[in-house]
Amino acid sequence: MGKALIIGCGGVASVAIHKCCQNSGVFEEICIASRTKSKCDALKEKLSGGKTKITTAQVDANSVDELTALINQVKPDVVLNLALPYQDLTIMEACLAAKVNYVDTANYEPEDTAKFEYSWQWAYRKKFEDAGITALLGSGFDPGVTGVFSAYAQKHYFDEINYIDILDCNAGDHGYPFATNFNPEINIREVSAKGSYWEDGHWVETEPMEIKRVYNFPEIGDKDMYLLHHEELESLALNIKGIKRIRFFMTFGQSYLTHLKCLEDVGMTSIEPIEFQGQQIVPLQFLKAVLPDPSSLGPRTKGKTNIGCIFQGKKDGKDKTYYVYNVCDHQECYKEVGSQAVAYTTGVPAMIGAMMLMTGVWNKPGVHNIEEFDPDPFMDALNKWGLPWKESFSPELVD
Ligand code: NDP
């Protein structure tokens, strides 16, 4: 049916590419392009023999010119950005120049400032609309499926949603004292930032990991979870009717937190460059280089993830509560695509988002967050492509 250009060939991209190849009726052809072409070639080799035609290319995704030339050469129906958040704007610029639809899984971050907001990407709304192309922002799990869950709850179960708690639990054990489940640099920037939540029309800021709760996750049990700032809070606060408060909680084990604190205390998580043996290095980038590569965690990670949203609001004048979540097993993901569940739960929705634009099921020129689209076809696709969801109308609440 069409062709996708996938930029990046790391943990998340590997899952999305496996899934595109399973879905060859839609993804007749894909081009995998990344900084290190040998990784693209190795994955192509592994997946060859299927119905999806695969080509590979080398690209520096910081260069709009290189990207534009590649897009014009490949002529894809959609560009799926699975590189790092630093490359979002250059890839969006190239999509504009070549007039091709765009999908990503994380909002733009400038490399030298830990600032998580959509303003830079939302600034492209009119340009994309005028060009008649769609940018779908945040098509991973969180952001991504959490926005689809919110749109689904709003469409089917509520007249107004007043409270959303997004709960992200990873109960997987990889056996290392400290490792991250996706790109270590991006992960550590996110979790060491100040926390915040949206309440009564404004942000409430907290110290990192200041607010802790224990939640009894279905199919997992009690876990400590901590309030974090997370990018989808910003768009959901705008797009969901009647919102009074949105919070995001993520679980962390004690070993992860203790190591993170020690690394922070000695300056290893800093993004300020330092002089080292005659050259400038960024401590966090050095730390990334010595930590286990998240894509190597697949064979050793055991246990499950549970990510979902609890909604509280009103339907026909009555109070209503609704919890929708997905449970994913690390080892089942590994058996299927050779990756752990954190990459899997991001790569599957990335493939689905690209499919929604490629098939024209979603078509809304401009720059849009995922909850702005009809959630129903995406919810069906989650069940079909490996992330089935479950519902409860009387869940345990966070407070
Ligand atoms: P990885 O570090 O494993 O992969 C990133 C890939 O991008 C690598 O292949 C890397 O190349 C490539 N890349 C980096 N810089 C460039 C560049 N300048 N030009 C071309 N290619 C480049 O990251 P992950 O797979 O863990 O994460 C990918 C994305 O997914 C991130 O944006 C992350 O924030 C997001 N994410 C979203 C989640 C969600 O639920 N929404 C959850 C988890 C992650 P090389 O191999 O040379 O390093």
Image (cartoon, rainbow, N blue to C red):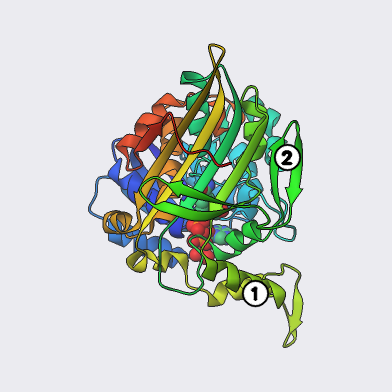
Q: In the drawing, does residue 120 fall left or right of residue 292?
A: right
Badge 1: how crowded within 10 Å, few (<14), some, or many (20+)?
A: some
* Front-lying residue, 82 or 383: 383
State how far apart marks 2 and 1 are (Cα): 31 Å
| Disc 2 residue type (three-letter) | Ser
* Front-lying residue, 244 or 151: 244
Up-down: is 136 above or below 287?
A: above
Q: Which mark is residue 271?
A: none
Up-down: is 340 above or below 325?
A: below
| Disc 1 residue type (three-letter) | Leu
Residue reaching furthest top? Answer: 316
Q: Position of residue 218 (x, y in %)?
A: 39, 45
Q: Position of residue 323 (x, y in %)?
A: 46, 34
Q: In the drawing, does residue 17 fall left or right of residue 91?
A: left
Q: Which mark is residue 119?
A: 2
| Residue at the image position 70 percent from the left and 38 percent from the top | 198
| Residue at the image position 51 percent from the left and 64 percent from the top | 253
Badge 2: how crowded within 10 Å, few (<14), some, or many (20+)?
A: few
| Residue at the image position 70 percent from the left and 59 percent from the top | 111
Query: Does the CB distance between marks 2 and 1 fall below 8 Å?
Result: no
- Which residue is denoted by mark 1 in the rendering? 263
Q: Position of residue 255 (x, y in %)?
A: 52, 71
